Image: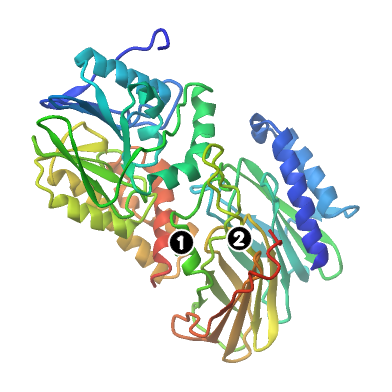
């Protein structure tokens, strides 16, 4: 392990569930792409990592953090979707020989995007620090369970929403949902799948019996389902106003300047992502009219 | 057309050489960009002088792309000079000549909009060729990255199944004899063949739109030669002059030599191509890619 790398602080939001809060920034050399909420869950016999981190450095720091808490084997590394801020730390766990768990569509998404993401992150963090994709060894289609010993995690592979390969985790023992980037709080959401799909998946997730949820970005724990309210409102406005713009004949650029601007003061990094979200929404919805 | 094809190939080679020899740090350097443009100028228009397009041709592009795979571009022609064709050149792209529109007798050659991929920080040039054989140039600098290597769509199978579907609508009220704007939408993945993973070798072979012909009552509005820089599901806004109600015909041909037709009554209710016919002759000459 690289000299000087150190464990980081986590919140134990429920017994055995440790979450590191990601910073609400884009990747920089300083933050080591530690921008997503990542962490681990401990059972009687084993540990599951739920998102291995945003870079090799981030992943190694997560591993050190786990080893300060427990020596139980790391049997599962769950990769919730294709985005590098969640999964590029995976190589830090290869020496543990865990099952790398992902949505059935994750291998394809990684294959298509990994090189692009890695080159970009290497420019920010330097070669050797970025990490990269690890091929999932356990693919989830529909539902699956993993057993950590007296603690069963229920996994759900979702239809296209935030991305086309979103996987959520439910810890039945404590009623804690880990929807990863299907839930953004405070940091503006980024749409990379389907707007209608995301609203549908959110509706389903709201009916899951969980008392709290761990957003992919934002606080380490929020009440559930009330914690989804801001996201739902934003996506609803994005849907309604983009549809209106298309109906009125506004072109893409005009829509970008107009849609969802009422949400500006409610989200961090709004200006960095809203225009992109409008673009995604526009190209999805223009074929419906 | 043969000449244009040669130009495209030439441009492709230049672009690839340029991409290989250029350091990314240069992308922001005006000197390096000017040099690249000099090379492109000589390759695309050898021996031709380019005149300042101020007052004749105007190019609209966002200074920073919100989605590098879908950058909205507008080209406006003042009408001061009679223009026969317009070139769009994205200097930093692997195949810089993104589009060449040739206007026909039914065109209202004042405004064009399209969406392109932009691979890195680059100048974008629009060149208007006048009827009296002068070339007028204007340019914009756009900050974007990864538009070519980032995969656009999330589902290849769905993208291919829907390929060739078209929609067309006229903007504003239709008045016979007055110039009108039409928006043409074409479902086509426009796979550029650049999304290959070095480890898995997973690779989407190129399949992109080569030409689009739009005609009204049997006479041409425009002929477009395009290439891998066009976004997935191209959307093109163009002007035409309808003498009366009539039929617009669209013919799209791609790099697998498949052709897709659409016939639309103009004005019509939310015209979609019910008469669309796909003639897939991809087992013919598939070497176009």
Numbered disc 1: secondary structure:
helix
Farthest residue, direction top: A3
Left or right placement of residue A6 versus residue B87 in this view: left
* Number of residue marks: 2
The residue at the point 45 percent across, 31 percent down is A132
Q: Residues within 10 Å of mark 1 (few under 14, many from 20)?
A: few
Left or right placement of residue A75 versus residue A93 in this view: left
Residue B135 picture quarter: bottom right
Q: Position of residue B180 (x, y in %)?
A: 58, 79
Q: Which numbered circle lies on residue A158?
A: none
Q: Which of marks 2 and 1 is nearer the N terminus?
A: 1
Q: Where is residue B133 in the image (x, y as percent from the top left)?
A: 86, 66
Q: In this view, does B115 lie above or below B68?
A: below
Q: Where is residue B86 in the image (x, y as percent from the top left)?
A: 73, 64
Quadrant (top left, top right, bottom left, bottom right) of the N terminus of chain B? bottom right
Q: Say if labels 2 and 1 share a chain.
A: yes
Q: Distance between the residues labelled 2 and 1?
A: 13 Å
Q: Which numbered circle lies on residue B207?
A: 2
The chain that hosts pointer 1 is B
Tell me the residue that label 1 is attached to. B157
Q: Position of residue B80 (x, y in %)?
A: 75, 68
Q: Is residue A8 visible to us here?
A: no
The chain that hosts pointer 2 is B
The residue at the point 63 percent across, 69 percent down is B282
Numbered disc 2: secondary structure:
loop
Farthest residue, direction right: B47
Q: Please, which colouring scheme is shown?
A: rainbow
Q: Is residue A280 visible to us here?
A: yes
The residue at the point 53 percent across, 23 percent down is A127
The residue at the point 70 percent across, 72 percent down is B223
């Amino acid at each position: 392990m690289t000299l000087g790398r150190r464990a980081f602080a986590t919140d134990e939001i429920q017994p055995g569930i440790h979450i590191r809060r990601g910073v609400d920034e884009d990747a920089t050399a300083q933050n080591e792409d530690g921008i997503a909420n990542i962490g681990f869950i401990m059972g009687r016999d084993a540990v599951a990592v739920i998102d291995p981190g945003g870079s090799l450095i981030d992943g190694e720091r997560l591993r050190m953090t786990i080893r300060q808490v427990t020596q139980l084997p790391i049997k599962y590394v769950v990769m919730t979707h294709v985005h590098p801020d969640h999964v590029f730390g995976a190589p830090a766990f290869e020496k543990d020989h865990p099952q790398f768990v992902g949505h059935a569509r994750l291998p394809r998404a990684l294959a298509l995007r990994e090189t692009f993401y890695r080159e970009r992150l290497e420019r920010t963090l330097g070669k050797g620090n970025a990490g990269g994709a690890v091929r999932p060894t356990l693919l989830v289609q529909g539902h699956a369970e993993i057993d950590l010993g007296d603690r069963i995690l229920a996994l759900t592979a979702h239809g296209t929403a935030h991305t086309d390969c979103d996987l959520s985790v439910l810890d039945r023992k404590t009623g804690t949902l880990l929807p990863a980037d299907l839930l953004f709080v405070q940091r503006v959401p980024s749409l990379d799948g389907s707007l209608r799909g995301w609203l549908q998946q959110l509706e389903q997730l709201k009916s899951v019996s969980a008392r709290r949820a761990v957003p992919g970005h934002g606080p380490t724990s929020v009440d559930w389902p009330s914690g989804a309210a801001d996201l739902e409102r934003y996506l609803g406005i994005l849907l309604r106003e983009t549809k209106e713009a298309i109906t009125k004949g506004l072109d893409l650029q005009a829509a970008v300047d107009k849609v969802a601007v009422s949400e500006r003061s409610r989200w961090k990094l709004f200006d960095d992502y809203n225009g992109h979200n409008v673009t995604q929404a526009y190209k999805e919805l223009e074929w419906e009219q | 057309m043969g000449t244009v094809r040669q130009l495209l190939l030439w441009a492709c080679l230049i672009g690839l050489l340029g991409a290989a020899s250029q350091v990314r740090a240069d992308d922001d350097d005006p000197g390096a960009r000017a040099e690249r443009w000099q090379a492109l100028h000589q390759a695309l228009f050898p021996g031709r002088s380019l005149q300042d397009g101020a007052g004749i041709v105007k190019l609209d592009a966002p200074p920073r792309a919100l989605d590098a795979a879908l950058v909205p571009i507008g080209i406006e022609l003042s009408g001061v000079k009679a223009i026969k064709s317009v070139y769009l050149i994205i200097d930093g792209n692997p195949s810089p000549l993104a589009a060449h529109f040739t206007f026909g007798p039914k065109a209202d050659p004042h405004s064009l909009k399209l969406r392109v991929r932009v691979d890195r920080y680059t100048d974008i040039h629009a060149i208007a060729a006048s009827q009296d054989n002068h070339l007028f140039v204007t340019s914009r600098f756009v900050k974007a990255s990864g538009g070519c290597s980032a995969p656009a769509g999330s589902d290849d199978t769905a993208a291919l199944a829907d390929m060739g579907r078209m929609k067309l609508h006229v903007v504003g009220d239709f008045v016979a004899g007055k110039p009108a704007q039409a928006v043409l939408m074409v479902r086509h993945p426009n796979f550029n063949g650049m999304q290959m993973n070095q480890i898995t070798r997973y690779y989407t072979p190129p399949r992109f739109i080569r030409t689009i012909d739009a005609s009204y009552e049997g006479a041409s509005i425009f002929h477009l030669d395009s290439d891998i820089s066009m976004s997935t599901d191209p959307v093109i806004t163009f002007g035409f002059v309808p003498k009366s109600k009539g039929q617009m015909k669209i013919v799209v041909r791609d790099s697998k030599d498949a052709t897709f037709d659409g016939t639309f009554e103009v004005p019509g209710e939310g015209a979609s191509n019910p008469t669309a016919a796909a003639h897939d002759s991809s087992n013919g000459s598939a070497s176009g890619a």
